[in-house]
Amino acid sequence: MYYKPHQNIKTSKADVNLSAMEVFQAFESDESTANEQYLDKIMAVSGKVRDVSKNEEGIVSVTLDAGQDMFGVICQLDQLSKHPREDFPIGEEVSFKGVCTGMLMDVVLVRCVEMN
Amino acid sequence: MTIGLSEVQAQKYFTREGKISFYSDTPIEKIEAHNQKATCVLDVASGRMEFAVLVKAFQFEKALMQEHFNENYMESGEFPKSVFKGQIADVDGIDFSKDGTYDVTVEGELTIHGIAQTVSTPGQITVAGDTISATAKFETKPENHGIKIPSVVRKNIAEVVQIDVNVALEPFKK
């Protein structure tokens, strides 16, 4: 039990399936209800790539457009999974699934993998 | 995170990719967790600084530790964010228009598990062109934030947990 592995996101079924716009709207209009509904859930989210960044440790984050001026849905790629690609052209329509952790300025999903 | 976006001007620096790690070292167990998605805003005119982090975005090596951390200790379903709001005490001594490194003191309120504590801690500001890097180390006791640790595992968790903050801030542009 002590060495219980982290959940395998690739083989896990998404609990919810939403567009980046719907996710952002849900958190923006009523954050505490959205927290109750979505925190810790495996969320499949789709949208247009707005920004891609890679930090100094090589962790890639993809921001999906949520129809907002400044904020979106950030999908941080899973460090425990292999990714077929880590380069996503701006404007491309993509889908990720990952664990929903809540909203700061953006809604943040961690442990994301791309869905086909 | 509450920043008045309408008031955001050029003297504000910002990141959404701040790194926050914490460390609990005891002879029995070393625990660490990392989060690369902290937001931070610094107003260089006033020295006001805020950062915020989603508790569930901390990643541990061991899944079970991560589960205990979220469910038993931080109760992150109820308290999803941890926040610091404060001030660089000696901001007047920093020339943000020139490259350089400054030792500073950061003072403010650290809210973890829904409970705010007043803190003062050393930090460092490095100005390099358009980027301002800031690091700080906080130390706090879980009990100060109303986190109850069962006596059977009390020796596995440090009395004082160290929190490292490392952010690279860029001018806030709309």
Image (cartoon, coloured by chain):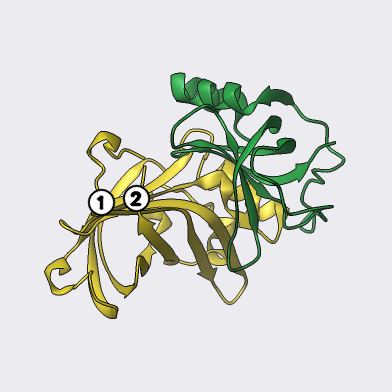
Using the image as rendered, state which of residue B47 and residue A7 is in the foreground: B47
Residue B38, how many percent across, how many down? 46, 52
For the point 54% across and 57% down, the residue is B36
Q: Quadrant of the C terminus of chain A?
A: top right
Residue corresponding to mark 2: B172
Q: Is residue B132 above or below residue B39?
A: below
Crowd rating for badge 1 (residues with CA inside 10 Å; few <14, some 14–19, many 20+): few
Amino acid carrying label 2: it is Phe
Residues tagged by mark 1 and mark 2 found on one chain of the structure: yes
1 and 2 marks in contact (CB < 8 Å): yes
Query: In 3D space, how far apart are the residues under numbered discs 1 and 2 (Cα atoms)?
Result: 6 Å
Query: In the rendering, at what x and y percent does residue A33 appear?
Result: 51, 20
The quadrant in which residue B99 appears is: bottom left
Tell me the SS state at disc 2: loop
Taking the image as drawn, is residue B109 in sight?
Answer: no
Q: Which chain is yellow?
A: B
Q: Position of residue B45 (x, y in %)?
A: 16, 57
Chain A, chosen colour in render: green
Front-most of B107 and B75?
A: B107
Mark 2 crowd level (few <14, some 14–19, many ≥20, 10 Å Cα): some
For label 1, the residue is B10
Mark 1, secondary structure of its residue: loop
* A58 left or right of B143 in image: right
Is residue B82 in view from this perspective?
yes
Whichever of callouts 1 and 2 sits on the residue coming sooner in the sequence is: 1
Circle 2 chain? B
Q: Position of residue A80 (x, y in %)?
A: 77, 57
Please, what is the three-letter code of the amino acid marked with disc 1? Ala
